[in-house]
Image (tube, helix red, strand yellow):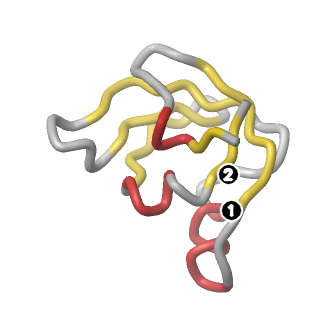
Amino acid sequence: MKTLRQVKVGQTVTVLKLSGEGAIKRRIMDMGITKGVTIFVRKVAPLGDPMEITVRGYELSIRKADAEMIEVE
């Protein structure tokens, strides 16, 4: 199992599953991150927080704690 947090800059991955409960999961889904969607990792801040990603053509920032909740392949 690999999470979005472990993906390197420049890689494109597909979401397999969202972990987490309630508000956290809702926030991730509100960003358009759902099962089967493709995510491109554009940039990661020097300390790893936040991660800059592209989802469905939108450029987003995601916290590393949230990225841990997203299982990818």
Image check: 25 left or right of 45? right
Number of numbered discs on residues? 2
Q: What's the residue type where badge 2 is placed?
A: Gly
Residue at 74% in and 40% down: 15
Residue at 59% in and 59% down: 69
Dot 2 lies on which element?
Answer: loop
Tell me residue 70's x, y (percent): 63, 52
Outermost residue to the left? 46
Outermost residue to the front? 1
Circle 1 residues within 10 Å: few <14, some 14–19, many ≥20: few
Residue at 53% in and 17% down: 11
Tell me residue 62's x, y (percent): 42, 52
Callout 1–callout 2 Cβ contact below 8 Å: yes
Question: CA–CA distance between discs 1 and 2?
Answer: 5 Å
Tell me residue 52's x, y (percent): 37, 37
Image check: 12 left or right of 47? right
Residue tagged by mark 1?
A: 29
Dot 1 lies on which element?
Answer: helix
* Image quadrant where residue 20 sits: bottom right
* Image quadrant where residue 31 sits: bottom right
Tell me residue 36's x, y (percent): 84, 39
Image check: 42 left or right of 47? right
Circle 2 residues within 10 Å: few <14, some 14–19, many ≥20: few
Residue tagged by mark 2?
A: 32
Position of residue 19 relative to residue 12, above or below, is below
Q: What's the residue type where badge 1 is placed?
A: Met
